[in-house]
Image (cartoon, rainbow, N blue to C red):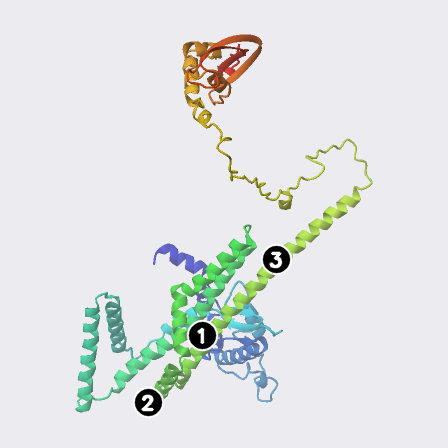
Amino acid sequence: MDFETVAYLRANSRAWRLLRADTAPLAIHVLGTIFIVDNVRSIAESDLIARVDDLLYAVNAQTAGNSPRTAPDAVGSPDADPSPPARPTYPRSARDYVDAWASPEQGWLRKFYPEGHDEAHYDATVDVERAYGFVAGLRARSFVGTESRLSTIVELLREMVSGADPDPGARLAELRRRRDAIDAEIAKVAGGESPPLDAVALLDRYQHFSSTARELLSDFRSVEENFRTLDRGIRADIAAWEGGKGELLDQIVGERHAIADSDQGRSFQAFHDFLLSRARRDELTGLLQQLVDLDAIDVDRSLGRIHFDWLDAAERTQQTVRLLSEQLRRFLDDKVWLENRRVVELLRSIERSALAVRDASMGDLVTELDATSPSVALPMERPLYTPPLFTGVESRLDAVDADDAVDLQSLFEQVYVDSARLASTVRTALSSTDQASLLTVLRDHPATHGVAELVGYLGLVEDDFELVIDTDVEDAVLVSEPSGSASSGGGERLVRMPRVLFVRRDATRGGMLA
């Protein structure tokens, strides 16, 4: 332990402060007797003051040599010493000492009000346990057992090494070794070669057992203290929380899960489950009763019920966790209620302000509205689906006579004009200029399908050029009809038409159209 840690503990540890206090002998004796030796976990204020008063009187009587001058019942008796009574070592009242020990400056007693009680109750803090344990360890012991501790250490070491080995073969070898050792022990007992433990061996193991059992009982106050510390941290987070309630609840639930999943939480839960097992509890009861009945050593008979004290302390720790959770839920409900009340107060403040300025002149106050009414587009305002109209086609033909037969030759003489070829011809003409007239295009690429091809040029609709008709200028276009055409019979035709221009669209957008 480094120097800074020791200096910090000396300045801030309540256990260290208790050891340095002038009333340390009285506080450690009184609080240790009530809360550690008698294992009291909660005591009413009146009962505590009565017990402290009894112990205080005994201490004052003992320190004064049990002189009749200091005994209250000796004052005024005929046999009493006429000299003034001696001042007691601890002159304050029991209530004054209890209030001082429970004050925030000392913090050796925890004062609380159980649910359904109007009277304050008290419990010792973990600092009293630490100070009491330190002082108890200072006493000289005539016998210090070492064999049982060494055996426990070796056994724990074997369990850790064997349990951490991932090789199943090694674990089986360890189990077989234990089985062989047990078989050898059974053989010795059966053969009368294994004498029972003597008094020294029993005393060694008894000291180890009693110290471990009482340390385990005192550790529950540390567990409760850790839970309360975590609860205070959560309350501080709630009070200073500025985010969403969902995130806050996630954090709180996460913290609660952190308690259960922590090393301490899992160890405590395993211990609690062990005690709740009826079979194991009956086994403990039988073993402890056999221990108390031993004649070879002097056994503290209170150890016969130590497992019930463990169970009471564990239940109290569980009750503390449940109580903290309930208080935390109420704290959250109160916070939500305060927020709702704040919203109502703001709304009423706005109403009062509006009534106060209702008759006041608005002056040059100008405000702007984006719209006099909101534009709402309701989903049902959309037009419903309208099915298309059905147009029937009569494909049946009436029978005709052979004299009335239609000449179908004209159907085979129809001219097909390829619009893609015409568009390609126009693009070729526009490759070197922004616009070209139909007359120019036909001069470079004469029409091969007569007037039909001329009409095909007029029907072109393309993305890269457009057709512009100048009605102010007239052109005379000479086209040749196909020689096989039945309608025209071949030859040339002169067509007069307004001037037709093909203009590139980019030139049109750039204002280059002449």
Position of residue 443 in the picture relative to residue 74 (left or right): left
**What's the residue type where badge 3 is placed?**
Val
Q: Nearer the viewer, mark 2 or mark 3?
A: 3
Q: Alpha-carbon neighbours of circle 2 within 10 Å: few (<14), some, or many (≥20)?
A: few
Mark sitting earlier along the chain (3/1): 1
User: For the view shown, which residue lies furthest in the right direction?
Assistant: 359
Q: Which residue is mark 1?
A: 314
Mark sitting earlier along the chain (2/3): 2
Q: Is residue 493 positioned above or below 370 on the image?
A: above
The reply to whether the C-beta atoms of the residues labelled 2 and 1 are less than 8 Å apart is no
| Rendered image: mark on residue 294 | 2
Which residue is found at the position 24% from the left and 68% from the top? 161
Of the 4 image quadrants, the one containing the N terminus is bottom left
The answer to whether residue 218 is seen in the rendering is yes
**What's the residue type where badge 1 is placed?**
Ala
Q: Nearer the viewer, mark 2 or mark 1?
A: 1
Q: Which residue is mark 3?
A: 336
